[in-house]
Image (cartoon, rainbow, N blue to C red):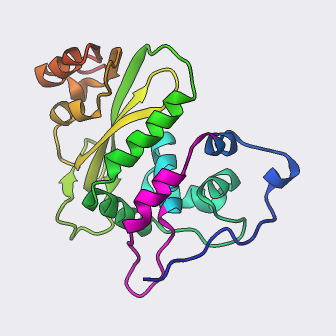
């Protein structure tokens, strides 16, 4: 399967005139080589089309987590924002992936057992670059819509006042001070937050802040078992 070549155009970005963003600096802190080597097994193109470089799609997944973006919003931001393009390796004018590319890539990561492994590697590297005292963890869930309602792994979920969505739910555990994602667990969209939440807990989580969807002994006991203190919002607040 052929792959697209990206980043061939080296001009046209403000960064070339010395205006760096925080993402430009962050990209320099990470050793991408082990990630790139692990991603060599990934090929997830649409039928008859060249595949996008797996590294570009993985970096886009990081942006979606750090900035809490749906696949649709991620595709729009990647097309529009120079800092996002540079971080993922795209030049100023070339096309960027549509949302369906992210759906296929995410499924390929899970199929190869690389989703948690690679995100853990990024977290490990970033932690090694910073000296900080952990004070707490934020746990929250984000709905990720399926590219097709025929996706058997996704499920329907309906929240009050919102249209029904078919897809998945990403439970994210992030450092309360830095917003650095430390753990992520992906489940069908209709999964119970309290039961899935423990998989999003890092080791030694400190105080764990979560909304009322995570209330219940199952999640609270899991927090305490890891040495943390549950701080769950009361129902109705």
Whether residue 143 is visible:
no
| Nearer to us in this view, 156 or 164 | 156
Q: Position of residue 2 (x, y in %)?
A: 48, 82
Residue 159 picture quarter: top left
Q: In this image, 12 relative to 219: left or right?
A: right
206 to 139, vertically: above or below: above
Q: Residue furthest right?
A: 17
Q: Residue at x 39, y 72 (%)?
A: 43
Q: Residue at x 27, y 54 (%)?
A: 113
| Nearer to us in this view, 207 or 120 | 120
> In which quadrant will I find the N terminus?
bottom left
Q: Residue at x 30, y 25 (%)?
A: 211
Q: Residue at x 34, y 19 (%)?
A: 205
Q: Position of residue 158 (x, y in %)?
A: 22, 48
212 to 94, vertically: above or below: above
The stretch of residues the image draws in magenta is: 29-54
Whether residue 61 is visible:
yes
Q: Residue furthest left?
A: 217
- In magenta stretch: residue 3: no
214 to 88, vertically: above or below: above
Q: In this image, 38 relative to 141: left or right?
A: right
């Amino acid at each position: 399967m052929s792959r697209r070549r990206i980043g061939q155009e080296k001009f046209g970005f403000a960064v070339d005139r010395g205006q760096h963003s925080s993402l430009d600096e962050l990209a320099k802190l990470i050793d991408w080589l082990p990630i790139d080597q692990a991603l060599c097994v990934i090929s997830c193109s649409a039928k008859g089309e060249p595949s996008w470089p797996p590294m570009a799609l993985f970096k886009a997944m990081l942006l979606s987590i750090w900035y809490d973006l749906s696949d649709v919003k991620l595709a729009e931001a990647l097309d529009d924002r120079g800092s996002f393009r540079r971080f993922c390796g795209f030049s100023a004018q070339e096309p960027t992936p549509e949302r369906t590319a992210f759906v296929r890539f995410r499924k390929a990561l899970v199929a190869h057992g690389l989703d948690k492994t690679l995100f853990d590697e990024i977290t490990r590297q970033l932690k090694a670059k910073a000296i900080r005292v952990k004070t707490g963890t934020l746990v929250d869930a984000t709905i990720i819509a399926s590219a097709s309602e025929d996706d058997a792994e996704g499920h329907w979920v309906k929240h009050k006042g919102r249209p029904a969505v078919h897809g998945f739910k990403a439970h994210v555990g992030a450092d309360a001070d830095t917003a650095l994602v430390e753990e992520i667990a992906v489940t069908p969209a209709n999964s119970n937050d309290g039961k899935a939440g423990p998989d999003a807990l890092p080791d030694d989580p400190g105080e764990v802040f979560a909304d009322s969807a995570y209330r219940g002994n199952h999640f609270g006991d899991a927090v305490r078992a890891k040495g943390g203190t549950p701080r769950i919002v009361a129902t109705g607040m």
